[in-house]
Image (cartoon, rainbow, N blue to C red):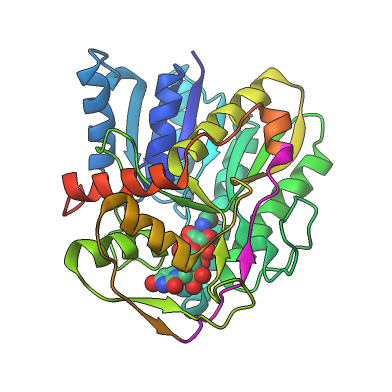
Amino acid sequence: MKRILVTGGVGFIGSHTCYSLLENNFNLCVIDSLVNSNIKSLEKIKYIFKKKKIDISAKLEFLKGDLKDKIFLDGVFKNAEQQKKPFDGVIHFAGLKAVAESVAKPFLYWENNVIGSFNLINSMEKYDCKTIVFSSSATVYGASTKRVLNEVSKINPINPYGSTKIAIENLLNDISMSLKKEWKIAILRYFNPIGAHNSGLLGENPLQKPNNIFPIIINSAFENKTMKVFGDDWPTHDGTCIRDYIHVEDLAEGHVKALKHLFQNKSQNITLNIGTGKGISVLELIKTFQEINSVKVPYVIEKRREGDVCKLIADNSKAKNILNWSPQKSLNEMCQDGWQWKCLNPNGY
Ligand code: WQD
């Protein structure tokens, strides 16, 4: 069984991907600083498997630490080597990810996301672990008037979050060019991951006030609290921004398929859009959430949010073809699973 180092594996996307990796018989070592995640997500993963009479405790190791701490990071790889349990690959989630917050705190984002990633990739090179799936973002495309975006669409991040993601992509691309016979790299550009695990036991659990829309919609419905819709004067059919919302379980599956693809093929460097190819406006998302869950989401129209772009929709054909992956879950299921998570876990983990 292959052993995978998962950075940021306690978080929203990370925990759902760890679940899928374990279902696919990988052994995991999760490292996470817990700055924006709750360790209970890993306990819940163990519980879900236990309910299926499967004990995965020997396959799911956790180490608390920060990628900015080079001594911690080197120790993780050195111990793996000394225990004769080297890592066969890395899935790299760890990073701050709020667009609005990155506009306010660029230093924090560059240090955390870029320096942390540099340290990780440096350690991988040093310990001869050269297979990585990297969690990038559609935010690297910036403002685009194109209907859908493919992987060669213009790169033009308009917020520090997106700038850090393309900086890390550029580092990986440079490494692939210079050491092209060795590294296997899959860069996954997420669009807008929402929803929760269908068990109702894993979900998005922001420790601070959320910036992204889906937990805000959920909290607005749960607490009958008026949320803000940032702008209804965008050039779209209903004046609100359009995004490509994808179920977090479909996104997790995309990571597992990307990792398997790298293991099954020679050294390469691929960049893939992971989205559904369907654009949904803010008001359409709110309407769907209300209807499918029979709840009310009170909202008020406010002015546009700094750093926002009008439309981000994925052309996901490359991922479909290369990974034999395709998103399975509907917007209704995203809304149902997200609401179920909140109702079963009103205070999160
Ligand atoms: C979506 C839309 C807002 C909050 C996302 C993820 C981020 C990263 C990049 C993966 C926008 C509107 C929001 C609110 C609103 N993902 N909105 N009221 O900015 O597309 O960024 O992609 O790497 O983690 O968040 O997502 O959810 O912040 O905003 O009207 O209270 O919802 O204006 O149009 P965004 P978002």
Which residue shows up at 59% across the image and 79% down it?
234
Residue 173 percent location from the top left of the image: 76, 47
- Asked if the stretch drawn in magenta spans residue 315, the answer is yes
Magenta highlight range:
303-318
Asked whether, in this view, residue 267 is left or right of residue 188, the answer is right
Residue 36 percent location from the top left of the image: 34, 56
Residue 306 percent location from the top left of the image: 53, 81
Which residue shows up at 72% across the image and 39% down it?
317
Asked whether, in this view, residue 244 is left or right of residue 263, the answer is left
Q: Which one is nearer the viewer's eye here, 267 or 150?
A: 150
Q: Tell me where residue 161 sits by quadrant.
A: bottom right
Which residue shows up at 28% across the image and 30% down it?
45
Residue 38 is at least partly visible in this image: no
Magenta part, dominant SS: loop
Asked whether, in this view, residue 96 is left or right of residue 241, the answer is left
- Asked if the stretch drawn in magenta spans residue 86, the answer is no
Residue 250 is at least partly visible in this image: yes
Residue 142 percent location from the top left of the image: 67, 68
Which residue shows up at 64% across the image and 77% down it?
235
Compared to 20, does 103 lie above or below?
below
Q: Which one is nearer the viewer's eye here, 275 or 7?
A: 275
